[in-house]
Amino acid sequence: RIPASLVSVSDYERLASEFLEPATLAYIAGGSGNEQSLRANIEDIARLSIRNRLLVDCAQGHTRVSLMGQGIAHPVLLAPVGHQGLVHRDGEVAVAQGAAATDTALIASTQATRRLEDIAAATDSPKWFQLYFQPRKENTLALVQRAEAAGYTALVVTLDTPVQSLSRRAQRAGFRLPAHCQPANLADFSVQDQPTTGAAGVFQGLMATAPGWQDLTWLLGQTRLPVIVKGVLDTDDAEQCQRMGIAGLILSNHGGRALDGVPSALSVLPAVRARLGAAYPLLIDGGIRSGYDVFKALACGANAVLVGRPQVYALAVAGALGVAHMLKLFRDELELCMALAGTPTVADISARCLAQDVHFTN
Ligand code: FNR
C-alpha cells in the first residue's frame, strides 16, 4: 500500500533518504564536479511560467504521442538508469513492472543489474535499449542482437560519458558498487573487455577505446532498429546526427553527471529545435520532477521527456508499485496542467503556452 501522504514525486525523493544508505543516496543524487549542471537542470525549469488560457474545449483531450512510429500513452519515459539492484532486490525488473502498469515506455540500461531479456519480459509497453559501446565491436554487436531478439524497438546510444568518475558526494561518502550490483548484461564479456570507471589516466585509459563518429556509422549498418543518440547538447553535433540518419535525439547532460558546467538540456532545446526542424524527434531529460515540468519541456519544443532519479527513489520506497504510482502522478499532473492551460493534446502545447519568450534561434 502507498501511504496517503505520498502525493508528489518530491515526496518520494524525501522519503527515499529513509530507505537508503547515505552512501547509496549520495551516488544516486550526486552530480559531477561542482554540480553546476545538476543545479541548472532544476533552476532552468523553475524559471519558466505557464500561461493559463480560459474556456478552451478540452473534452477530447488526451496525452498520447507517437515516437519512432510507435504509439505511446503519455510523453514521460523512464530514462536508462544502471545499477538499480542497489535500491531494490528486483531492480530493473520491478521498474519494468511499474512501467507496464501505467503503459509507460522504458529505456533499459546497458548497466542494468538484471538481464535485458528479463526486463523486456516484464512489460508489454514500448521498450528501447540503451547501448554503451563496448571496447570490442563483437561485444557491442552481441548486445544489439540480444536487444533486437528480446523485443526492444529502438536503440538509445549514450555518448556523453566515455569517461565518468564518481561524484564528490559519493566519493566522500565512500560509495562502492557492491558485488551483487554488477552489470548483468556485460557478465559474458571478459573483465579486460569491459569499460572501467575512474578518471585516472583519462587519455591512456578509457579514451583509448572510446567511440567516434565512425562507430556510430558502423552501428547504423548493424541494426534494423531506429538509433537514437543520448547526451547531445550542441547544435552542430545534433545536426551531424540528423544528417547521418540518427532517428532522434535525447538532449541531456546525464542528470548533471557527465561534464560539469554544461547547460541544461532545456536551455539548449529551442536552438536545437530551430536547427533540426519541427518534425525531428527531440526528447530531453534532467530535473523533470512534475507534470508541470513535463509541460514546460514540451512547450520548449520537446516531443517527450525522460525521468531518471525519480524512478530510483520510487523503487527504493515501494518497489514496482512505487514506480507505477510515481508515473501515475506524472501523468495525472500533466493532464491537469494541459486542461488548465487549455491544451487538449500534446500537439497543442507550444512556446505560446509560456509566459516568457522562448527564442528558437541558433
Ligand atoms: C543515470 N543515467 C544513465 N544514463 C544512461 O544513458 N545510462 C546509464 O546507465 C545511466 N545510469 C544512471 C544511473 C544513475 C544513478 C543516474 C541518476 C542516472 C542518466 C539518466 O539516463 C538521465 O539522463 C538522468 O538521470 C536524467 O536526469 P534526472 O531525471 O535524474 O534529473
Image: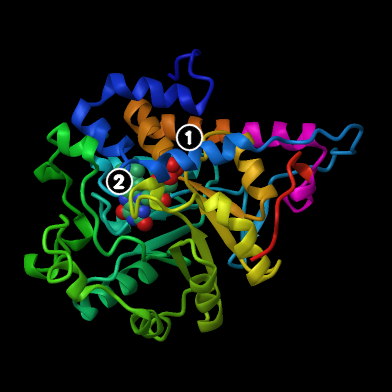
Tag in front: 2 or 1: 2
User: The residue tagged with tag 2: helix, strand or loop?
Assistant: loop
Q: Which sits in the foreground, 35 or 188?
A: 35
The answer to whether residue 230 is left or right of residue 109 is right
Name the residue that disc number 2 marks: 32
Q: Position of residue 309 (x, y in %)?
A: 39, 39
User: What residue sits 29% from the left and 18% below the top?
Assistant: 18
User: The residue tagged with tag 1: helix, strand or loop?
Assistant: helix
User: What residue sits 25% from the left and 72% below the top?
Assistant: 210
What is the quadrant of residue 131 in the picture?
A: bottom left
- Is residue 339 highlighted in magenta? yes
Residues marked 2 and 1 touching at CB (< 8 Å): no
Question: Magenta stretch mostly in which secondary structure?
Answer: helix
Q: Amino acid at mark 2?
A: Ser
Residue interval drawn in magenta = 332-352
What is the quadrant of residue 87 in the picture?
A: top left
Residue 122 visible in rendering: no
Crowd tier of the residue under label 1, counting other residues whose Cα lies within 10 Å: few below 14, some 14–19, many 20 or above: many
Q: Which sits in the foreground, 129 or 160?
A: 160
Q: Amino acid at mark 1?
A: Ala
Name the residue that disc number 1 marks: 324
The answer to whether residue 58 is left or right of residue 141 is right
Please say if 220 is above or below 182. Answer: below
The answer to whether residue 196 is left or right of residue 267 is left
User: Could you give the CA–CA distance between mark 2 and mark 1, rounded to whole angstroms?
Assistant: 29 Å
Among the two numbered marks 2 and 1 on one chain, the one whose residue lies closer to the N terminus: 2
User: What residue sits 54% from the left and 68% below the top?
Assistant: 235
